[in-house]
Image (cartoon, helix red, strand yellow):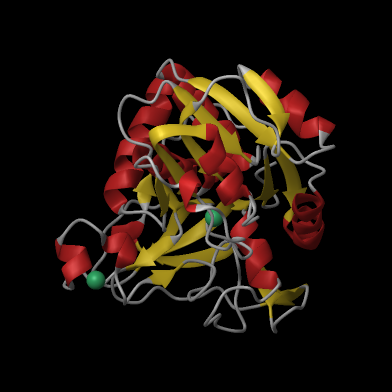
Amino acid sequence: MKAMVLERRGGLLQERERPIPTPGPRQVLLKVEACGVCRTDLHLLDGDLPDIRYPIVPGHEIIGRVAGCGPDVTLAHGLRLGIPWLGYSCGECWFCMHGQENLCDQTLFTGYQVDGGFAEYTLADHRFCFPVSPDYDAAEAAPLMCAGLIGYRALNMCGNGVKRLGIYGFGAAAHIVAQVALWKSVELYAFTRPGDEGAKIFAHHMGATWVGDSNQLPDMLLDAAIIFAPAGELVPAALRAVRKGGVVVCGGIYMSDIPSFPYALLWGERQLRSVANLTRKDGERFLDLASKVAVHTHIERYPLHAANKALRDLKEGTLNGAAVLVMAGND
Ligand SMILES: [Zn+2]
Ligand SMILES: [Zn+2]
C-alpha cells in the first residue's frame, strides 16, 4: 500500500510503499476512503508536539471500510467506520473512571503515536471507532472526526445560555461549530486574521452576524469565545471581548506563548480554559447531532500523494473549510 510517512522532525512527508498491516487483538483493518488534514498535522510536521513516534503516518480524521479484523473482533466486511484522534485510553485510571478518558495518561493518539490515515490502509482499536452512515460522502464526513468533534467539545465548554459566541480563527473546526451554533440560535461573531479577506467572506457565508479582525471588538460583549487559531495573543483579545462570567476556550493542541495581560481582563469571574482531545461519548453525541443539524462540510480534495501540498495550503491559509485526502477509487 501507499503511505505518506513523516520520518524525522521538521521534514516533509515521504511517499512510501509498505505492506498492508495485519490486525492484532482488538484491531480492525480499514481500507481508507478519505482522511482529513488538521492543523495538528502541521504541528506534527514542525515538531511542535512532544513524544512524536517516528516514523509516523499522520492523519486522524479517517473514514474507511472494514477490510479485516483481529482474532477477537467481528465486524462486517465493508462496514464504514470513522477513526478519530483518540486511538486508545486505558479504561482504568482516575480520568477514565470519571468520564475524562480524553485526559488519560496512557492515551495513544491516531497519526501521532499510532499510524493514521495518510495511507491506503490503516489499523485501529475497534473500541475507539465510530459507525459512520454510508449516506455521507466519505470526504465530506472526514472533517467531522476531529474538527467537528473538537469544535463540539469546545462549544459545550462554553456552558449553557450562550447567545453570542465569538470564534477566533475561521477554519475547518469553526465552520462546523458555526452550523451547530446557528442551529441552536446562537449569534456568531467571527474574528479573522487582519487582511484575510477570504476568511471574512467565508465567515459571512457561514452565517456570522459580525465579522472583523481579531484585534477589533464588536459593539456587544460576548457570552463566550472559542480560539481555534494557535496564537497566544488572542487570549487577552478574547477575554476583552467577553462579558463578566464569560468563558474563553482554547481549542487547539498547540498555541504560541500567551503574553502577560492585566488581571482586570480575567476579573469578573471570566473563565479561561483549554479543550483537550475527545471522549467516545463526545463522538457519539456529536455524530448524532451532526445528522440532526445536517452539518455540511466545505472541503478541498487532494490525492494522497499531494498531502504535502494540502498541508502547505492549510498553513498558508489559502483554503476555506477543510483539506481532505481522498484515496484513489473514492474520488
Ligand atoms: Zn485534529
Ligand atoms: Zn486511563
The residue closer to the viewer here, 265 or 47, is 265
Q: Is residue 65 visible?
A: yes
User: Which quadrant: the N terminus?
Assistant: bottom right
Residue 331 placement: quadrant: top right
The answer to whether 147 is drawn above or below residue 45 in the figure is: above
The answer to whether 261 is drawn above or below residue 218 in the figure is: below
Question: Viewed as shown, does residue 112 lie left or right of 280?
Answer: right
x and y percent of residue 210 in the render? 64, 20
- Picture residue at 32% right of the left edge, 45% below the top: 282
Q: Is residue 119 visible?
A: no
The residue closer to the viewer here, 112 or 124, is 112
- Picture residue at 33% right of the left edge, 51% below the top: 76
x and y percent of residue 178 in the render? 53, 28
The residue closer to the viewer here, 261 or 133, is 261
- Picture residue at 64% right of the left edge, 53% below the top: 233
Residue 285 placement: quadrant: top left
